[in-house]
Amino acid sequence: MLPRARDYERVTRRIETALGGARDGGADDVIEAILDASAGVLAITGSCWHRTDPSSGLPIAHAMLGEPAGSLEESLIYEFRRPDLNRFAELRSRRSPVSALWTETRGEPRASARFREMIEPAGAADELRAAFVDPFGLWAALVIFTERRMTADDLEFVSRLMPAATAALRRDAAARALAERPPVDAGDAELGPSVLILDRDDRILAADAVARRRLGAVPDPRPVEVPGLISFVAAQARWGSDGRSQTARMLADEGQWFLVNASLLDDGDAGNVAVVVQPAPGASVADGALRALGLSAREREVAALVLQGHSTKAIASALMISPWTAQDHLKAVYEKVGVSSRSELVSLVPAAVPA
């Protein structure tokens, strides 16, 4: 039996109460609250989600519940290599970032290769995707597998939850960015870039000792050699970038950020990829924090220059704006961040200094 309007309303109230009380909870708490409350009305059989780098939209951590269909490695084929529907790269730019294969295909989900080859064989009737996106970036990506077909009412129900859930996820990202300030590992930074070579199935063909140590510091719920983020950038380098290298940030257990760059090697048919892993520059880390704090693109530019020690006059010159305009942007930054001076901003936000 399909849910009734009162069923959606009851679950919505439950989720709103949970989100309102989750201001000190993490991203997983937010998404688990949604999944736990809506499991019955959506007939959920399994789910997986990624906490994402707000700028690139690539995963920095992921988790799963129940029995999700397929695997990360399989899903990457449909996300980057083969034409398919409801890809997150497209979904995040839509007016409504919530979609299901049944409604997207107007009742013909087998038009999706992902459904035919991965979802249907696993026994799921449909797949619903939600991109938690706002003007400051993509904060998480959720995939739900269900034992019945999704309806327009189901999508409307999930869509109504998105603004509050996205705000909660961005609050969590801001709290992480400002609270998780591990001491700089000077020894690791001095080691510089580390390298590993992956085959087309993301098995490590070769790696230096530093790369293996850094991989060991990155959590992943799956028994695999390389974290999901590396699989994503490697897939992009193989299939989605016309031979261009791909770069993203990766988060380790202790709050340290790494910059990951993947490049397809000469023999493209072999699918081998070189991956360089190194400590992330301060500017990259600061950008994520400033996005989480709700700063606009121009405000992030001003704040980054302040963190690098530039004067108001130098900021105005660099951005080709008047000093008065630069000062207005800076006042807006102070208000959003909750500080009243340059020194407070510098002490609060990870420094955007060159690596």
Image: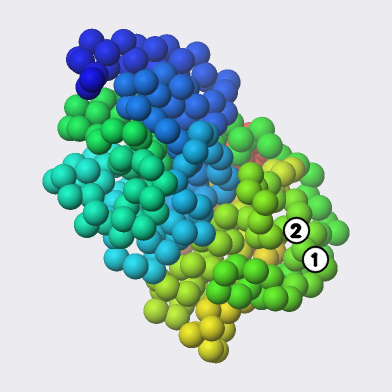
Image quadrant containing the C terminus: bottom right
Query: Where does residue 267 sit, x and y in percent of width and height?
Result: 53, 89
Q: Is residue 153 left or right of residue 129?
A: left
* Residue type, label 1: Val
Q: Is residue 88 left or right of residue 153?
A: right
Query: Where does residue 308 sit, x and y in percent of width and height?
Result: 61, 54
Q: Which mark is residue 210?
A: 1
As drawn, 171 above or below 22:
below
As drawn, 280 above or below 243:
above
- Seen as rendered, the residue at the extreme right is 187
Q: Which mark is residue 78?
A: none
Q: Residues within 10 Å of mark 2 (few under 14, many from 20)?
A: some
Q: Judging from the image, what secondary structure is the residue with disc 2 in?
A: helix
Q: Nearer the viewer, residue 6 or 53?
A: 6
The reply to whether residue 30 is in sight is: no
- The residue shown at (76%, 54%) is 216
Q: Is residue 336 left or right of residue 184?
A: left
Q: CA distance from mark 2 to mark 1?
A: 6 Å
As drawn, 191 above or below 290:
below
- The residue shown at (46%, 77%) is 244
* Residue type, label 2: Arg
Which residue is label 2 attached to?
214
State the image quarter where residue 37 is shown.
Answer: top left
Callout 2 touching callout 1 (CB < 8 Å): yes
- The residue shown at (53%, 38%) is 64
- Seen as rendered, the residue at the extreme bottom is 266
Q: Judging from the image, what secondary structure is the residue with disc 1 in?
A: helix
- Seen as rendered, the residue at the extreme left is 106
